[in-house]
Image: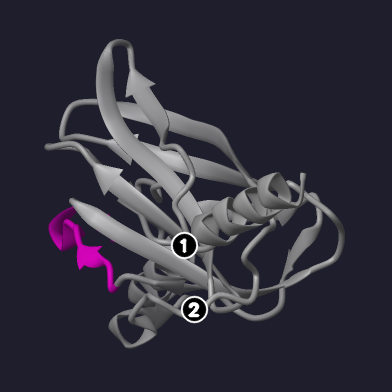
Amino acid sequence: MKMLLLVLAAAGAALAGDWTKPVEVRHETTLCVTYRAKLSGGYLVIEAAHSKPWHTYAIDNKVRAAEKLAGKKSLGIDQPTAITVSGGLEVAGGWLQTPPKDLSKPELRWFTWGFEGQSLFAAKVRKTGPGPAKIGLRGQACTEANCKNIDAEIELPLSGMAGALDVDLKALIPAK
């Protein structure tokens, strides 16, 4: 019995810092983006992996667009990525994100920033309960011709909160 408990404890420790199973966002049968999450050194890290030619938008897309528009009207603003955290975990600081790509069309007064390929989001978190944590993802995935609203959820076990940080936070920037 003791041996079984040791094996289970070791397996739990091995899972610390592991990614969750990917959550897929599809437009009909086409894969747009997948999300997965992990805990790393006291941070919640979320990865978005975009299929070509799909992209999503920065957490601070509306703030960036308002700055560029300087009070002028726009045809519209793409929906930013929004992340909620509940179920035994809470955000204890601001979000960091991969530096977004400028996807703006200034001639149309359309200002937008987003992500293609792989992007990361990270925030310092603290445990408030046993979990599992629920990470809500909302936003918009688009190509030049189509857009798909994102409403996804990742369930994240709260084991491994004390693991070492294995993500380069210096490669990320604070969301405005």
Dividing the picture into quadrants, the one containing residue 13 is bottom right
Secondary structure of the residue carrying tag 1 is: loop
* Horizontal side, residue 146 vs residue 23: left or right: left
Disc sitting over residue 133 in the figure:
none
The residue located at (31%, 37%) in the rendering is 33
Q: Is residue 112 visible?
A: no
Which residue was labeled with disc 2?
176
The location of residue 128, given as percent across then percent down, is: 85, 65
The location of residue 105, given as percent across then percent down, is: 16, 56
The residue located at (14%, 58%) in the rendering is 107
Q: Residues within 10 Å of mark 2 (few under 14, many from 20)?
A: few
The location of residue 121, given as percent across then percent down, is: 44, 65
Q: Is residue 119 visible?
A: yes
Magenta segment's dominant SS is loop
Q: Residue furthest bottom?
A: 170
Of labels 1 and 2, earlier in sequence is 1
The magenta-colored residue range is 99-111
The residue located at (75%, 66%) in the rendering is 90
Taking the magenta stretch, the answer to whether it contains residue 100 is: yes
136 lies above or below 90: above
Q: Residue furthest top?
A: 28
